[in-house]
Image (cartoon, rainbow, N blue to C red):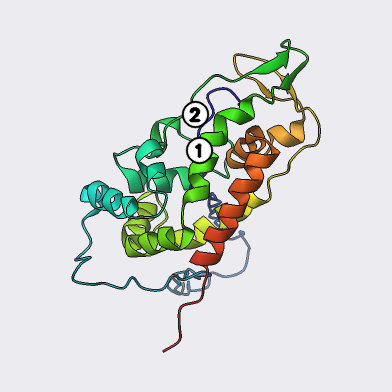
Amino acid sequence: MINKPMVGVAAAVAAIAAGTWYYLQSRHTEAPPVAAQPLPPPVAEESVVEHPLPAAQESVANGPLPTLAESDAPLSEALMHMSGASAVKDYLLPESIIRHLVVTIDNLPRQKVAVQKRPIGPVIGFFLANGDELHATLDAQNYERYQPLVAAADKLDMQQLTAVYIRFYPLFQQAYQDLGYPNGYFNDRLVQVIDNLLAAPQPAGPIALVRPNVMYTFADPALEARSAGQKLLIRMGPENAARIKAKLKELRAAITVAPPKH
């Protein structure tokens, strides 16, 4: 859906496919009964970590990590010391930051994102379309609405952002497991989400829309079937999307660097 767009550029997410348990039923035979053999105990499936993060470098200045419930103020303070800190002040919502980031990242590759859980405020302005409800196109003036956000993202130092992320990573991991992924590794999910966003297409020419109900949707079923995060990048326009993808590539490179061998 295209009006009331949700800003989720800073983060990103892939959904875990739910496992389905199959129970095999034994077939009735006329053979004499055989003593049942005890089944082996279930083997716990080990999660494979593809992109481990190096451990945070603790220091007296940093001190111990706060609890997840008390992390908003310390995380905000850490982010404000980064280059481009104005982006934090102007866009980041101050409550439940880590939980909302994790939920949003986990939702970006889905069709919908929980607006009430977004970590960043909405884009100012109204969605614009050219034409009528049956034959409309995306108005290029919409791209201007995203320019302040993109400019703020351009100023962020991804190495500094990664340092803050690594420092607070145990809390991101806890919030991710609290979503129902006890064996999941959040950094792997974040990398998957970034890859999903980087795969967003950029249609050439006017983007056709339809309005079957209240909201406009993409007329092309292939575009409408894209993830919420990819559709957001399409709505931003080609130049804005390219700049955001460049920052996402920087972030991906920073969070996938192999830790040093000891």
**Relative to residue 219, is residue 74 drawn left or right?**
left
The percent coordinates of residue 136 (x first, y second) are 75, 17
At x 49% / y 29%, what residue is drawn? 123
Q: Nearer the viewer, residue 57 or 187?
A: 57
* Quadrant of the rendering where the C terminus is positioned: bottom left
At x 69% / y 36%, what residue is drawn? 225
The percent coordinates of residue 77 (x first, y second) are 27, 51
Callout 2: 10 Å neighbours few (<14), some, many (20+)? some
* Residue 191 position (above or below residue 90): below
**Badge 2 is on which residue?**
123
Q: Which of marks 1 and 2 is in front?
A: 1
Looking at this rendering, what residue extends furthest in the top direction? 132
Is the C-beta separation of discs 1 and 2 under 8 Å?
Answer: yes
Label disc, if present, on residue 149 of the rendered structure: 1
Is residue 183 in view?
A: no
Which kind of residue does numbered mark 2 sit on? Val
Q: What element carries label 1?
A: helix
3D distance between C-alphas at marks 1 and 2? 8 Å
At x 29% / y 48%, what residue is drawn? 76
* Residue 47 position (above or below residue 11): below
* Quadrant of the rendering where the N terminus is positioned: top right
